[in-house]
Amino acid sequence: MFELPATGGCRCGRFRFSFDSKPFVAYTCHCRECRKLTGSAFLTCMHIPAESLTLLKGDPACDLRQTDSGNSLITYFCDRCGGNMYAKNSARPFVVTLHVGSLDKPEKVEVNAHIWLKQKLSWVEIPDGHRRFDESGDWLEDYKDDPSKYGE
Ligand SMILES: [Zn+2]
Ligand SMILES: [Zn+2]
């Protein structure tokens, strides 16, 4: 696991953040919306307590959408380089979903779960032993240290 506090930001450096809590869970989402958001095949992200995120530089732009699960999702991104950094979901008001690729040291994050597999591109292969969900993930077990943050 990475050293805390850990840092990240967008590609161009206009926005920087730090956080001082280890993630509850880290996973890859294969849904169509995450492909549109990233311009790539999937999005890898992790849940941290909302109060552990500090904006060090800049005030990101945001994009609001409704999810297939019926919640509101706000994604925060850089309006200069387009890099997306984190999101907040109305289903979990106590949590921020950090996009792992925006971290300075993403290689330190252990990812072992996959969601929205029913929309996965056919050539993306899931490693043996990783948890799999056809739609949204069930993370209750991952929040066992602080179930009040789970929000559902
Ligand atoms: Zn930027
Ligand atoms: Zn997704």
Image (tube, rainbow, N blue to C red):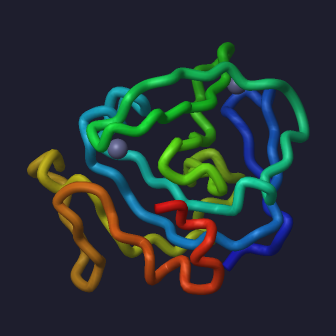
| Residue 45 left/right relative to 55 | left
Left/right of residue 137 with respect to residue 32 in the rendered view: right
Q: How many marks?
A: 0
Q: Tell me the quadrant of ligand 1.
A: top right
In this rendering, the answer to whether 126 lies above or below 60 is below
Quarter of the view holding residue 28: bottom left
Q: Residue at x 74, y 48 (%)?
A: 8
Looking at the picture, does residue 75 appear above or below residue 136?
above
Q: Where residue 72 sits in the image (x, y, percent)?
A: 46, 33
Q: Residue furthest right?
A: 56
Observer-nearest of 107 and 136: 136
Residue, x 30% and y 43% (percent of image)?
A: 69
| Image coords of residue 140 (percent x, y) | 44, 76
Q: Quadrant of the N terminus?
A: bottom right
x, y percent for residue 122: 9, 50
Q: Residue at x 61, y 50 (%)?
A: 93
> x and y percent of residue 87 in the render?
57, 40
* Residue at the far top in the pictured view: 80
Q: Is residue 66 above or below residue 24?
A: above
Left or right: 78 with respect to 132? right
Q: Which quarter of the picture shows residue 145?
A: bottom right
Q: Nearer the viewer, residue 146 or 35?
A: 146
